[in-house]
Amino acid sequence: MATDVTLSAAIRGNLLSLQGTGTLVDRTNTRLATGLKVSSAIDDAVAYFQNKALKDRAGDLAARKDNIDQGVSSLQTALSGLQAVEAVLVQMKGIVLSAKSASDSERATLGTQLQTLASQMNHLANDASYQGLNLINATVANLKVQFSEKTAAVLQVDGADVRISTGLVLTAFTMNATYIAGSQAITKIAGSTAAAAFSDVSASVSIFDAYIDMFDSGITSVRTSAKTIGASVALLQTRADFTKEYINTLKIGGDKLVLADLNEEGANLVSLQTRQQLGIQALSFANRSEQGVLSLFR
């Protein structure tokens, strides 16, 4: 039965040193290949799990940032819709101004134009939807954006209804002047009363002025909603920029724990290769004494 080869203490010591150097060479080569000094919990459990926690946090925030970006798009859609609605309201106000000095037949034509603009404005408001959310055709609609799962930081933007109810108004200039202050001739334009039906009062300028005031109130209300949404867009953009920088900081912090210094590892490899060659020479020297004994038998 074969027995184990017995090595002298000198040879065994040099062999162990050479094996240790080989292990370090392998480790250095791995670091140079991967760029990581900690690639698993075996390398450094504390650094590995700290890095993992930072990277997981960065991933969670990246998902939040995606939601913030979508929120910005939703608000920008609503803002564009409000600006278009404001432009239509200004046109409608211009028609009312023209009606002050118009004849009865001209007013009938202007009334038809007013009806058309109101209908198109309602269509416009209904079309201002982003991913199923419309913030300018319903007061019950709202946008909620949560910035972090660790805090209660949430932005809520409530919707506004800027449509004109065509069932109550815009039926041409035929309503009696006494209805101007009455509910039969009043609708909502972004929270302000505004009626566009004119009466058989021929040149009663005060009635037209009352309607113009109502349109002015509606335009002001739309502008106020636009300012609110615009401020929310600016806030979301600020949070998006902050989140982007925060994610970058977390990733850099995690990298500091696990990334290898390639310059240092390159220098280590050169040193280890030199040490490996010296170890081989040392092992050769340790074998010379046994080789001397062998020469006695020649």
Image (cartoon, rainbow, N blue to C red):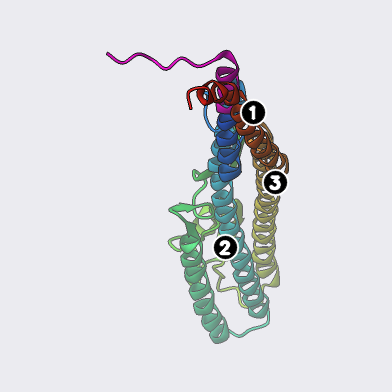
CA neighbours of label 1 inside 10 A, class few (<14), some (14 to 19), many (20+): some
| Disc 1: which residue | 282
At label 2, the amino acid type is: Gly
Outermost residue, left side? 1
Residue 267 on image: x %, y % = 72, 41
Q: Residue at x 69, y 35 (%)?
A: 256
Eyeballing the image, is 99 above or below 30?
below
Inspect the magenta stretch and tell me whether residue 211 lies in it: no
Q: Position of residue 131 (x, y in %)?
A: 45, 54
Give, as a three-letter code, the residue at label 3. Leu
Badge 3 or badge 2: first in the primary sequence: 2
Q: Which residue is mark 2?
A: 81
Quarter the N terminus occupies: top left
- The quarter of the picture where residue 59 lies is top right
Residue 245 visible, this angle: yes
Q: Residue at x 59, y 65 (%)?
A: 85
Of the two numbered discs 3 and 1 on the same chain, state the one appearing first in sequence: 3
Q: Nearer the viewer, residue 267 or 278?
A: 278
Query: Magenta stretch?
Result: 1-19
Residue situated in front as seen by the camera: 58 or 213: 58
Label ID, residue 235: 3
